[in-house]
């Protein structure tokens, strides 16, 4: 298993932790639905998921 090329972009997912109270507010109190856009920051965490060696070799071509 190897890290993805842009593994360092996974740190941008930490912004999602800052947005977490807004997400909770949407479902518990009825806050603004724009608060759900904060969940998009969590998608950057996918760069932290390592690849298998077969996936990494396919990516180079």
Image: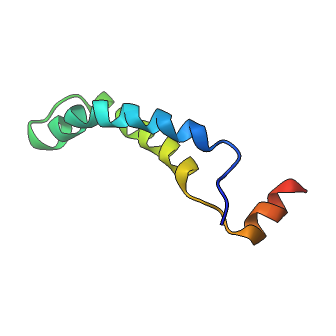
> Of residues 26 and 61, which is closer to you in this image?
61
Query: Across the whole image, how many numbered discs are drawn on residues?
Result: 0
Q: Is residue 30 left or right of residue 35?
A: left
Residue 37 in sight here:
no
Extreme residue in the right direction:
61
Display coloring: rainbow
| Picture quarter with the C terminus | bottom right
Residue at image x 65%, y 63%? 51
Query: Based on the displayed image, in which of its 4 quarters is residue 60 positioned?
Result: bottom right
Residue 28 in sight here:
yes
| Picture quarter with the N terminus | bottom right
Extreme residue in the front direction:
2
Residue at image x 57%, y 48%? 47
Residue at image x 83%, y 63%? 58
Give the image location of residue 29, x and y in percent. 8, 36
Query: Based on the displayed image, in which of its 4 quarters is residue 55 positioned?
Result: bottom right
Give the image location of residue 31, x and y in percent. 17, 30
Query: Based on the displayed image, in which of its 4 quarters is residue 42 positioned?
Result: top left
> Of residues 32 and 39, which is closer to you in this image?
39
Name above or below for residue 38 compared with residue 55.
Answer: above
Q: Is residue 23 left or right of residue 28?
A: right
Residue at image x 22%, y 32%? 22
Q: Is residue 14 left or right of residue 56?
A: left
Name above or below for residue 16 compared with residue 50.
Answer: above
Give the image location of residue 21, x and y in percent. 20, 34
């Amino acid at each position: 298993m190897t890290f993805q090329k842009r593994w360092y972009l996974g740190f941008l997912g930490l912004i999602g932790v800052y947005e977490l109270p807004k997400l909770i507010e949407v479902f518990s109190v009825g806050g603004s639905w724009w608060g759900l856009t904060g969940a998009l920051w969590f998608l950057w965490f996918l760069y932290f998921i390592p690849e298998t060696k077969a996936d990494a070799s396919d990516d180079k071509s």
